[in-house]
Image (cartoon, helix red, strand yellow):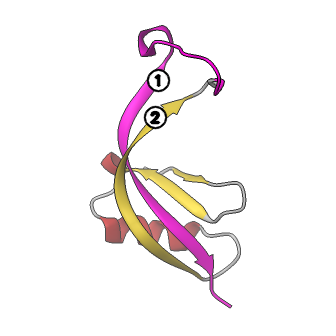
């Protein structure tokens, strides 16, 4: 099963659901394998609780979690830098 990665707009950060990876080393290898611009350095790998929703939640609104499909899960987060 393919492990899903979520990339930031300019591919400077990457996120992956912790439950999909056996270790942070496996997460880092998956990032390197899927990096579009060639070889990269993966650094500052952390496990952080993150919110995920398929709908955009406006920043200036207060919405109870029970009214939206919002998920709180542990994700690996990391910085990505292209190696030249």
> Mark 1 and 2 residues: CB-CB less than 8 Å, in contact?
yes
The x, y position of residue 48, in whole percent, is 36, 50
Question: Residue 51 — which label?
Answer: 2
Depth check: 65 or 27 in front?
A: 65
The x, y position of residue 67, in whole percent, is 48, 8
Q: Which of marks 1 and 2 is nearer the N terminus?
A: 2
Give the total of numbered labels: 2
The x, y position of residue 41, in whole percent, is 53, 80
Left or right of 60? Residue 44 is left
Left or right of 28? Residue 79 is right
Q: Which residue is denoted by mark 1 in the rendering?
A: 70
Magenta range: 58-84
Question: Residue 50 — which label?
Answer: none
Left or right of 18? Residue 54 is right
The x, y position of residue 20, in whole percent, is 36, 50
Q: Residue at x 47, y 64 (%)?
A: 78
Figure quadrant of residue 47: bottom left
In the image, farthest residue toward the bottom = 84
Residue 19, compared with residue 14, is above or below; it is above
Depth check: 78 or 27 in front?
A: 78
Q: Is residue 2 visible?
A: no
Q: Which residue is drawn at 52% across and 14% down?
A: 63
């Amino acid at each position: 099963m393919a492990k899903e990665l979520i990339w930031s707009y300019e591919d400077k950060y990457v996120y992956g659901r912790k439950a999909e990876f056996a270790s942070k080393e496996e997460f880092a290898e998956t990032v390197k394998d899927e990096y579009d611009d060639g070889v990269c350095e993966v650094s500052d790998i952390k496990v952080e609780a993150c919110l995920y929703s398929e709908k955009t939640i406006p920043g200036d609104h207060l919405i109870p979690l029970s009214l939206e499909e919002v998920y709180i899960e542990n994700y690996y987060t990391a910085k990505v830098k292209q190696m030249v």
